Amino acid sequence: MEVLDDLPHRLLLVGSSARMLAQSGARAGIRPVSIDLFADRETRACSAYCEAVNAADIGFERESLLRAAARLAPAGYGYALVYGSGLDADSAALEELARGRTLYGNPPEILRLLKTPDAFFETLRRLGIPYPESSRKLPPDPENWLLKSAHSEGGKGVRPCSRVEPDSSAYYQRRLPGKALSALFLANGEDARIIGFNTLRTAGHLVGQPFLFAGAVNRADLTPEQRRQVQTYVARLARAVSLRGLNSLDFMLDGETCRVLEVNPRPSATMALYDDDFPHGLLAAHIRACRGEMPDEMAASGTVRAFKVFFAPFDLEVSEETRWPEWCTDTPVTGTRIGVGQPVCTVCAEGTDQRQVECLIERLESELFERLYAARS
């Protein structure tokens, strides 16, 4: 497939998992250079080059990332750059990556703004956007609060409140009951359009990370008024902050009010729930929106889609005999060693009914356990 004329022929993708971006690029004929933490089978299949680099506590080990980028997609050689997760806590690394490459995404200063608690909450206050009560000081009723790190992503830095003062990158936030929701949207610096609403899932298998992101379904139990609220928030933020490309807004319900938790100013994992609805993929739409273009229509199909990360219940070494079902993606290559509690792959399902799709995900997860750990059963 030829690369569409208006898209970059040389593209560097950087993300904790670059798979969804690489697969989306394939719809537009792009074979990118992909750098992430896994270099799984699907990412390799869609990339001209693919390499895994070292992880830090959150995201990438910076020097490993920059060395790989310099070797595989040298600055000054006509490469464009698209980034996903993994850089939220390191805008300085994004600055280095963007030097000598055309950045299609929000610039480092926007990433810093939206990932700095005081600046972010002040932006929300100024725009009249509600959010859960937040504080830098230990609340008098800590059992009703969470302690959150600004230097985290995917729920890694969120835990129940303890009786300690937060460091400079952390804050307390009142805990709301219910499920976390999100809106995936496309923006061009002035306008924004919501692609879809999602319900997010947490893993809950690690004591120190009870809110770790583990999956999503492209459905959310919202009233028309609540959807209008979120659309208003997205429009205000896109215009005030000049957001571009694919972004996501996480929020929770507090009665009839949607309260914003965070904005991820880059393509989120929920992009994978909608990419099949766009003939040339959402990566192409992301690049065009960063140039100021917006599609005439953003209608997604009625298909219910869900995914769930399968975490290793026991140590696992992937062998040549391992056979991955077609409903799995992010599958590791032969020889990969995976420790207890670490992600193995992603289980995917789709259909016409949300409950049936979510039940199917659970069944497939059980089947995958039997396939991988039959000898232990």
Image (spheres, rainbow, N blue to C red):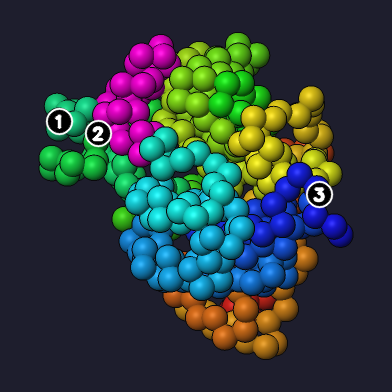
Query: Label 3's element?
Result: loop
Q: Amino acid at mark 3?
A: Leu
Range of residues picked out in magenta: 112-134
Closer to the chain start, of discs 1 and 3, is 3
Locate residue 61 relative to residue 76 in the image: left or right.
Answer: left
Can residue 259 be seen from the camera position used here?
yes
- In three-dimensional space, the C-alpha distance between marks 1 and 2, rounded to whole angstroms, equals 7 Å
Residue name at image x 50 percent, y 39 percent: 106
Q: Magenta region's main secondary structure?
A: helix
Closer to the chain start, of discs 3 and 2, is 3
Give the labeled residue for mark 2.
Answer: 172
Instruction: Give neighbour class at mark 1: few <14, some 14-19, many 20+ (Cα, 10 Å).
Output: few
84, above or below 345, in the image: above
Q: Amino acid at mark 1?
A: Lys
Locate residue 33 relative to residue 355 in the image: left or right.
Answer: left
Give the labeled residue for mark 3.
Answer: 4
Instruction: Give neighbour class at mark 3: few <14, some 14-19, many 20+ (Cα, 10 Å).
Output: some
Locate residue 19 relative to residue 164 in the image: left or right.
Answer: right
Residue 104 percent across, percent down from the top left:
58, 44
Closer to the chain start, of discs 1 and 2, is 1
Give the labeled residue for mark 1.
Answer: 137
Residue name at image x 29 percent, y 44 percent: 149
Q: Amino acid at mark 2?
A: Tyr
Residue 291 percent across, percent down from the top left:
64, 35
116, above or below 7, in the image: above
- Residue 128 lies in the magenta-colored region: yes
Query: Label 2's element?
Result: strand
Nearer the observer, disc 1 or disc 3? 3
